[in-house]
Image (cartoon, coloured by chain):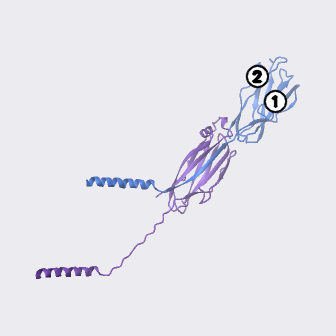
Amino acid sequence: MKKLGLIVLAVVLALGLVGAAYAYWSQSLSINGTVTAGTVAAQFVSTTTPTDPYATTVVTYPVQGNGYTVMDVAVTGAYPGMNLTVPFEVENTGTLPVTVSSTQAWTGGNATLQSDLTVTTTAPAGTLQVSGAFQTGNGNVVISMPSSVSDTSIENQTCTFTVTLSANQAH
Amino acid sequence: MKKIGFIVLAVILALGLIGAAYAAWSQIINVNGTVSTGNIQPLFENADVTGTYNGVAYSVTGNGTTALTLTLNYAYPGWTGTFDFDIENGGTAPIGSLNYGSVVVSPYPADITVNNGTLPATPIAAGVDVSGGSFMVTINGTAVQNGVYTVTIPITAATGP
C-alpha cells in the first residue's frame, strides 16, 4: 500500500511540473484583415461627330450620372451609297483592367430598311488599363447602305438599333 | 473508395474554377442608333415656257413637277429645236445619277427624232437646282400634215452621291 502511495505521489508531482510548464507567460498577436472589392467600370468619352455631305448625324449622351454610359446616335437623310463611320472612345474608369466586346441588334422600325442597312461595330482592341496611355480605347460603328439599293419604299423610313459594349474584367 | 472521393473533389474544384471564370465582373454601356432615310424628288425647272422658234409655236408646262410637257404647233419637216431644262432635287437625299431612257414616239416613230440629249451634272444635293439638261427635236420628212404626235422622253433619277 505504501508503494502504491509513492507511485501516486510521483504521478501527481510529475503532472504538477507539466502544469507549471503550461503556465509560462504568453502573448497573442492578431492580424485584422479588411478587403475592399475593386470595380469594373467604363464610360464613353465624347468624340467627334461624323460628317457626310448629305446625311446628318447627331450624337448625344443622355445618361450623365457616373459618366456617359449611353451614347445616342441619330442619323437622318440616309441614302443608298451612304457609308458613315461613327467613332467612339471608351475609358476604363474602374480599378481593374478590362477588355471590351460588342454585340448589336435591331430594336425597331422599318424591317425593309433594316435589311438594306449594314451596321458594323469595332470594339476597342486590347486591354484597357486603369491608368496611363492605354486607359482608353477607340472603336467605331459603321452604318452603310449599298448604292445598289433601289427600293424606294424605304424612303423617309426609320429604324433603330442598339450596340451593347461589354467591359469585361481582364484578369 | 478513397480514389472515388479524390475524383469527385477534383471535379468540384474544376467546376469551381470554371464558375470563377464566368463570374468575372463586367459592365454594359450602350450605343443606341436611329437611322432615318431621306428621299429624292427630281423636279423639272426653268424649261422654256412659251415662244416661237423658226416658225413653230411651242409651250412647256410642268416646271416644278416630275413631268414636263412640250407642245409644238405648226411644226414641219426639217424643223429642229433644242430645249433646255434644269433639274432640282426637291428631296432630302442626293440624286446620284440621271439617265435618259428610250424615247417613245407615237403614232409614227420614224417621223420625229429626239437626240443630243444632255443632263445636269450629278450628284445633285437636296434643294439644289442644276442646269445643263437639253434635248433636240427634229421633225423628219415623213411627218404627216396636221399630224398629232406624242413623244415621251423618260429620265431616271437614282440615289447615291
Q: Residues within 10 Å of mark 1 (few under 14, many from 20)?
A: some
Asked if marks 1 and 2 touch (Cβ < 8 Å), the reply is: no
Q: Nearer the viewer, mark 1 or mark 2?
A: 2
Q: Which residue is mark 2?
A: B105
Query: What is the spatial separation of the Cα atoms under label 1 and label 2, in whole angstroms?
Result: 17 Å
Badge 2 sits on which subunit? B
Disc number for residue B121: none
Q: Is residue A37 above or below residue B139?
A: below
The letter of the blue chain is: B
In this rendering, position of residue A142 left or right of residue B140: left
User: Which is nearer the N-term, disc 1 or disc 2?
Assistant: 1
Q: Which residue appears at 61% of the width and 59% of the height?
A: A65
Badge 1 sits on which subunit? B
Q: Position of residue B74 (x, y in %)?
A: 87, 22
Give the total number of marks visible in the rendering.
2
Disc number for residue B82: 1
Q: Position of residue B96 (x, y in %)?
A: 69, 38
Q: Is residue A10 above or below residue A160?
A: below
Q: Position of residue B118 (x, y in %)?
A: 75, 33
Chain A, hue in figure: purple
- Secondary element at image label 2: strand
Q: Position of residue A114 (x, y in %)?
A: 60, 40
In this rendering, position of residue B24 left or right of residue B131: left
Q: Which residue appears at 59% of the width and 38% of the height?
A: A115
Q: Amino acid at mark 2?
A: Val
Q: Going by the picture, which residue comes out furthest to the front? A: A1
Determine which quarter of the picture holds residue B80.
top right
Determine which quarter of the picture holds residue B90.
top right
Residue nearest the viewer, comparing A147 with B100: A147
